[in-house]
Image (cartoon, grey):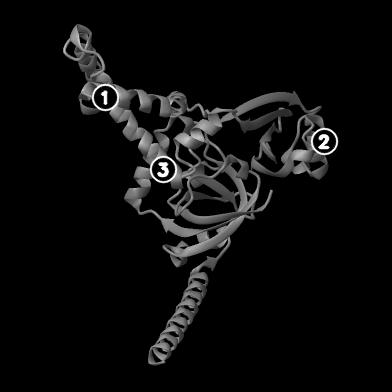
Amino acid sequence: MQRMFLLVVLAVFIGSCNQTAKKESKETQVTEMEQVISATIEELLAQPADYVGKEVAISGMVTHVCSHGGQKCFVLASDGETQIRIVTGGEIDEFKTSLEGSNVAFKGVFTVLNKLETDEHVEDHDSKEHHSTEMAHTEAEKAEYFIEAVDYREITQ
Amino acid sequence: MNWRKWNRWLHRELGYLFFGMTIIYGLSGIALNHYVARHWNPGVVSRSESISYPSALHRASVDRITIEEILEMTGERKNYKQYYFPSDDYLMIYLKGGHINVNLPMGEITVTKVRNRAIFSELNYLHYNKPKKLWTWFSDLFALALILMAISGIFLVRGKKGITGRGGLLTVIGILIPLVFLTIYLWL
C-alpha cells in the first residue's frame, strides 16, 4: 500500500514536471516569435542599424535565384526597384529556381558587413565570370546588407 | 581459407553490392565536374525561343493588356505568375517553369523554359546528399566500401601483373597524377 502511494506521488510529480516543461516550452515559443521583427525591405534599408543582428520577417517577389547552387536569391521591395539579397542559412540547403516570380515570406537574421568584409565580398563577386553582365539584382548582390534566411514560405505562385 | 581467398571474396561481394552506387556517383561526378568548369547545370534543361512583338514597346505603355497579348503570343497564359521591370528597357514575365524576357525598344520576346533533366536531376539529388537521414549512412558505407575495394583490388593478382610488378607501377602512376595537379594548381 505504501509502495502504491509512493508510485502515485511519483506519477503526479512526473506529470506536473511535464506540464511545467510544456508550459515553459510554450512560453519560449512565444518569446521566440516575439523576437522576430516584421518589416518591409524599405524599412530595413532606411534604418539598418535598428535591425542588424536581429531576426526579421520580410516578404516580396523573388526576382532571381542564383543558378550556381541556389545559395542566394533576391527579393523585390514594393517600390518595384529596390532588391535585397537573401542567403541560405539554418536548415535551408538551397533556393529552388521555381521561386522566381513567386511571392515568398522569409524569416532570417539581417546582417550588415563592415567595410573590409564588403570589399572582400565585392572582390569575390567581381571575380566570377558569370557576374560580368550587370543585372537588375547586381546592386543587391554586391551590397553590404543581406538576410541570412532560416525559414521561408511561398505565399503565392 | 587463406587471406587472398577472403580478399577476393570481399572485393567480389562489395563490387556486386555497390555496382549501382558506383554508376550513380560516377555519372553525377562527371556532371559535377562540368557544373564547376563550365557553369553547366546538369539538373535542369533550359530552352530559349525568340519571337517579335509587332511594334516597339515603352515601359509606360505596358499594362495588363500588353502582358496578356504577350502571353497569348507565346502560348503561356496558363503558366503566368507575375511581371516586373528589371530596367526601363526590359520587362520580365515570370512563368511556372520559366520566364519571358522582353526587350522593350526592340520588341524582342525571348521565352525561356526550364525543366528538370531526367536521370541527372535524380542522380544529383543523391550525390549531393539531399535526402540526408539514412542516405548519409548508406553513402558513407559506400565510400568505405570503395576504399576496401581499392585496397583489396591491388592484391587480387599475384606475379608480374600484380602489385609487385606492372600493377604496382600503375598504382604509383595513379597516385602521382593527382599529386602533379595539386603541385601545379595549388601548391606552386
Quarter of the image with the N terminus of chain B in it = top left
A77 vs A127, left or right, is right
Circle nearer the N terminus (3, 2): 2
> Contact, CB < 8 Å: mark 3 with mark 1?
no
Q: Which mark is residue B69?
A: 2
Same-subunit check for callouts 3 and 1: yes
Q: Position of residue B180 (x, y in %)?
A: 23, 19
Extreme top residue here? B160
What is the spatial separation of the Cα atoms under label 2 and label 1, in whole angstroms?
Answer: 70 Å
**Eye-nearest disc, 2 or 1:** 1
Please give the residue where the numbered disc 1 appears in the rendered image: B7
* Residue A106 location, quadrant: bottom right
Badge 2 local density, few (<14 within 10 Å), some, or many (20+)? few
Which amino acid type corresponds to the residue marked 3 in the rendered image? Thr
Circle nearer the N terminus (2, 1): 1
The subunit carrying tag 3 is B
